[in-house]
Image (spheres, helix red, strand yellow):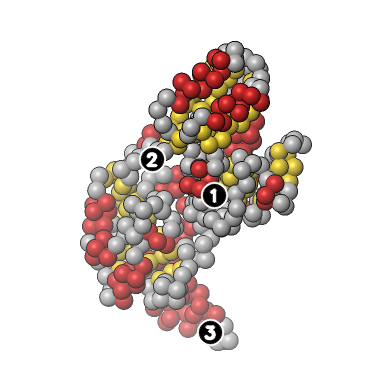
Amino acid sequence: MTKYTCLNPIAACGLDIFSDSYEKTEDFASADVVLVRSAAMHELDLPDSMLAVARAGAGVNNIPLDKCAEKGIVVFNTPGANANGVKELVIAGMLLACRDIAGGINWVKENKEDAGIAKSTEKAKKAFAGTELMGKTLGVIGLGAIGVKLANAAVDLGMNVMGYDPYLSVNSAWNVSTQVKHVFSVDEIYKNCDFISIHVPLMDSTKGMISAEAIASMKENAVVLNFARDTLVDEEAMVEALAAGKIRRYVVDFPNPTTAGKEGCIVIPHLGASTAESEDNCAVMAVNELIDFVENGNITHSVNYPDCNMGVCKGAGRVAICHRNVKNTISQYTAVCGDAGINISDMTNKSRGEYAYSILDIDVPATPEVIAKLSAIEGVLKVRVVK
């Protein structure tokens, strides 16, 4: 029986996928696998028995990735599951930035007692006049699942679209509209775009990438949209640019004291993926990733170990090993199996930075002695009998 726990509410349509061989527990220490959304895990004690953590969403800043990797705990996320929900909110953000819709709605609320409000509206509405999206240029920084959807939707809205992504995947390249101009320098985005939307993961290399210098190089009256992570932008510099009239609007989905209530900032309370459809999609994807890992040893969409897939095991046994990416490790695995008279019928090994993952299909079930010897090899972090 595999035990799972949820650190946040997870959509029932996902949890319902678990078969009777899975049991929900409220005891984190006894859980084999964990489902999480935004709950902070950095201060939690991770039990040695834990196998995997699945983030029902894309960002994993709330999960101690290195700590998990060192304990042989595979961390998954669900890229693309919430992409449409975020895309739609970015479009709403562009509309809110170029049309003072919120200001107009507030004016109506403030004048609700005016019996002649219909007539007053015709005089007042000019204060809320804006501009249209059609014909404007949108720059998308990061052409992943969300960026591609946004770029394609903007093309359909009649916008000119420029995309920047030095790590553009083959899948994204196939899916992005041919009308999106792929540029090779982010400076081209800054200098030419009326709207700039950032969609990159938060890493040391991307933190603060929308710097004061980047803002200074942007077109006058540009709109910047940030639905990725607030710390990708130097928000103090952004607020100063808004006050100086350099930037028209800053639309951000992450409230904090720097931007909340500031003139020119449209701050949304982290609603990007807060749709019933996104939550369902993330839950379903996360649970399926865990099931495939638990039952087959396969890794799909991990953020701390390499993706690795051997399909469904058709042999007598399968062993999965989380280990460091060091030389001569595989030869030691084969030696242990050979000494035990076990034939390896199939195997695969993938690496990702400092860590690697191996799957061994064997002709007979692995004995406790073989597992112990594999576990004792230097650099091995966790050995699991899948079958």
Discs 1/3, front: 1
Instruction: Give the distance between the C-alpha atoms of the residues marked 1 and 3, in whole angstroms.
Output: 41 Å
Please state the horizontal and vertical placement of residue 152, each as a whole percent of the image.
40, 45
Ranked by sequence position, the earlier of labels 2 and 3 is 3
Task: Return the residue at label 3.
Answer: 111
**Residue 115: image tag:** none
Q: Which of marks 2 and 3 is in front?
A: 2
Q: Is residue 282 left or right of residue 135?
A: right
The mark total stands at 3
Vertical placement of residue 13 versus 342, above or below = below
Location of the C terminus by quadrant is top right
Q: The disc labelled 1 sits on which kind of residue?
A: Gly
Local crowd at mark 1 within 10 Å, few (<14), some, or many (≥20)?
A: many
Marks 1 and 2 sit apart, C-alpha to C-alpha, by 22 Å
**Which secondary structure, mark 1?**
loop
**322 relative to 96, above or below:** above
* Residue at the spot 48% in from the left edge and 43% down from the top edge: 303
Residue 176's mark?
2
Quadrant of residue 171 within the rendered picture: top left
